[in-house]
Image (cartoon, rainbow, N blue to C red):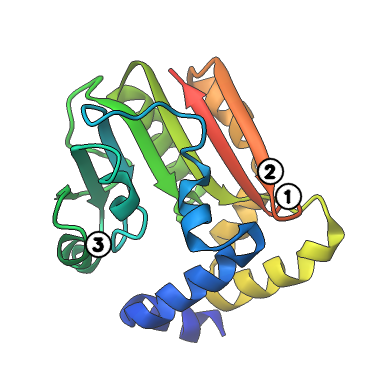
Amino acid sequence: MATILRPLSYRYPWLYNTVSRLSALPVGGEEKFRHLALEGLTITPDTKILDLCCGGGLTTRFLVEKSNDVTGLDASATAISRAKKNVPQADYVEALAEKMPFADQQFDLVHTSVALHEMEPQQLTQILKEVYRVLKQGGILALIDLHQPTNYLFWPPVAVFIWLFETETAWQLLNTDLVAQLKSIGWAECQQRLYAGGSLQVIQARK
């Protein structure tokens, strides 16, 4: 089923958006979901933000409400085209997350939303190293992504979601300790919060 529904969800924005909204219900809806990784952070109009793996701009549209300096990056030309149409206030770059065309220490905040589970383990490590490189000293990585449920009642919906829409990399992320991986790269200050029975994790890590 994943080989059918996954391509369809990316081909048809209405299907992708519907899946995203349904997935956000356990934490109070899509708007709440899109703000979870940003809770407690001080963001001003001058904060330089990178929305990593921005897709069609679903979270970018909230970031531009907080900052006048938002850049969205995605490897998909189709996603970038949609993001430009949906959120024209941001700048966009089509590039690989593991090889970002940015100078060292360029951003105050790097944000990524449910994208890391798409990456192979080696690719994920390289992306996190790139994020560390482009962040300014004192800058923050804020992310939200899948996590192994701590409440067994959440295992069935998580498993069905992954079987229908994701690939093996999503299962791999469930078995990955992202906090430990971040610390091994250089982040000393990492805070993790779990939501939806532990099936979602928010991590804020300061460089």
Mark nearest the camera among 1 and 3 is 1
Q: Earlier in the sequence, mark 3 or mark 2?
A: 3
> Based on the displayed image, in which of its 4 quarters is residue 12 positioned?
bottom left
Say which of 128 and 27 sits in front: 27
The three-letter amino acid code for the residue at tag 1 is Gly
Which quadrant holds the N terminus? Answer: bottom right
Compared to residue 105, the image places residue 51 above or below, namely below
The three-letter amino acid code for the residue at tag 3 is Ser
Residue at image mark 1:
198
Compared to residue 118, the image places residue 194 above or below, namely above
Residue at image mark 2:
194
Task: Tell me where residue 29 appears, x and y as whole percent.
Answer: 55, 63
The three-letter amino acid code for the residue at tag 2 is Leu
Mark nearest the camera among 3 and 2 is 2
Residue at image mark 3:
76
Seen at 43% across and 17% down, the residue is 207
Q: Earlier in the sequence, mark 1 or mark 3?
A: 3
